[in-house]
Amino acid sequence: MGNITRGTTNPNRMRRLDRWLAGPQAWRLRAAVDPLVVDLGYGASPATAVELFERLQAVRPDVRVCGVEIEPERVRLAKELERPGLSFHLGGFELPVPGRPVLVRAFNVLRQYEEEDVAAIWELVCSRLAPGGLFIDGTCDEVGRRVSWVALGAGGPLSLSFSVRFGSIDLPSDIAERLPKALIHRNVPGERIHAFLQAMDQAWLAAAPMASFGKRQRWTAMCLALRDAGWPVQDGPSRWRLGELTVDWMAVSPPGGGYQP
């Protein structure tokens, strides 16, 4: 189920998300009865699926990563890289894999669909998750320096995350061009995501005196200011110093909140 996408990808492009999955979200994989992970729509090259497998092995040595692609030739070529714990399958959003995955990653996939298609796709994939599972719908630039993603559980969207390489942006709102499909057209006055991005910019500019100590300190000061202003910013300095910020979904969601079961 789905459409063939452009399939463009690059090695190490998903490193920022993978670091989050192997960090704050690692408990999901450790607690899973079946450590099954799906890389959905890995693209013309299976490199990022291989990287995901190798990174998650550090969390759970018996992890199983299944790469899923809807274009048969991409699957045929990827099968040459199969090994114990890593396999490739022909399919789409129905997730034709043995078992219920605890993690599903779909990056730069839904960006190529229409906004009105997103809620139904979210619902379909979330219905396949194992208890406590997580579906990640994300977007990034060509080399993974500007990244954003929505995390969803069985009950719907949970959070929105940003991760940037310091020096790749002038203002935090520069990430807007890499927002997930559910939000990218919502960055206009009156929408919650627009208000949050504007608040990020204001807090970043107000933290300019911290720039003499480095951009990590300035980003951390921005996150603290947002939390102090009442925004439901998650995690803490150990994640913020990585150029990462996660906020509760309802603080940035469009009207209706996206998919709700």
Image (tube, helix red, strand yellow):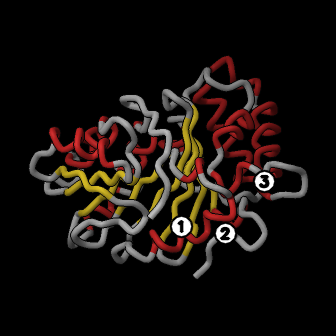
Residue 60, picture quadrant: bottom left
Residue 229, picture quadrant: bottom right
| First in residue order: circle 1 vs circle 3 | 1
Q: Secondary structure at mark 2?
A: loop
Residue under numbered circle 3: 186
Amino acid type at image mark 3: Arg
Q: Quadrant location of the C terminus?
A: bottom right
Q: What is the CA distance from the residue labelled 1 to the residue labelled 3?
A: 19 Å
Q: Which mark is residue 213?
A: none
Residue under numbered circle 2: 258
The answer to whether residue 47 is above or below residue 93 is: above
Q: Secondary structure at mark 1?
A: helix
Q: Which residue is at a point 24% across and 51% down the rendered structure image?
A: 88
The answer to which of 147 and 242 lies nearer the viewer is 147
Q: Would you say 53 lies left or right of 172 here?
A: left
Q: Quadrant location of the N terminus?
A: bottom left
Q: Which residue is at a point 44% across and 44% down the rendered structure image?
A: 17
